[in-house]
Amino acid sequence: MIEEFLDDAKHRMDQAVDKVASDFTTVRTGRANPQILNRVVVEYYGTPTPLQQLATMSVPEPRLLVVQPFDKSTIGAIENAIRSSDLGLNPSNDGNLVRIAFPTLTEERRKELTKLVHSMAEDGKIAVRNIRRSTKSDLEELHGEISDDDIRRAEKELQEITDHHTDRIDELLGTKEAELMEV
């Protein structure tokens, strides 16, 4: 019974860490990365559609991202969606492709993005702590069915699992910060 609670908590915490990692990929660094466009939604025949469903993306050069739409008539809508997103990118098209050149980041923009990444990491840690609180509450409800010593051991193990996952988030944060500050 205790193992089931701990396994469930570990699984949910893994998902929280994976969410933080995927959120980090959407933050722009100085290099071209197709995942940065994962949040871009294009108005396609009156329906908001994720860009990945309308085009292929490639990185021919470290600072250039090329978006090739499946339907050439959507090229203007794709360009407008990228321009109006909060990514600070200025796309251009030649009628067949949308090219996005990634300018080097200014020091001020790097600091803003670092704050954003810290906020994302803190949200992930909060999610992990909420999972810990929920699981601890479930364990305390077993009081009477299971000995107090077993519950204390399970709570100690739960804390170790929590610490491991918050450390993983900190590692991801350190890596992303280094990537952002790289000139």
Image (spheres, helix red, strand yellow):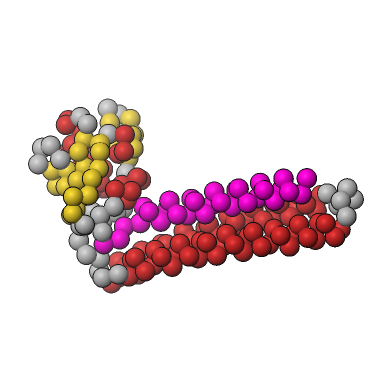
| Viewer-closest of 110 and 151 | 151
Magenta span has 50?
A: no
Residue 33: x percent and y percent? Answer: 29, 52
Query: Which residue sits furthest left?
Result: 94
* Region of the chain picked out in magenta, as a range: 1-30
Which residue sits at x=62%, y=64%? 163
| Viewer-closest of 35 and 160 | 160
Residue 64: x percent and y percent? Answer: 19, 53
User: Residue 152, located in which quarter of the rendered image?
Assistant: bottom right
Query: Which residue sits furthest right?
Result: 144
Residue 34 as seen in the image, left or right of residue 5: left
Which residue sits at x=59%, y=52%? 13
User: Residue 110, located in which quarter of the rendered image?
Assistant: bottom left
Q: Total number of numbered labels?
A: 0
Residue 26: x percent and y percent? Answer: 36, 52
Which residue sits at x=12%, y=37%? 96
| Viewer-closest of 19 and 86 | 19
Q: Inspect this view and state whether residue 91 appears.
A: no
Please name the predominant secondary structure of the magenta segment in the image: helix
Query: Which residue sits furthest front?
Result: 3
Which residue sits at x=42%, y=53%? 23
Q: Inspect this view and state whether residue 44 appears.
A: yes
- Which quarter of the rendered picture does the N terminus lie within? top right
Residue 112: x percent and y percent? Answer: 35, 66
Magenta span has 23?
A: yes
- Which quarter of the rendered picture does the C terminus lie within? bottom left
Residue 4 as seen in the image, left or right of residue 75: right
Residue 13 as seen in the image, left or right of residue 88: right
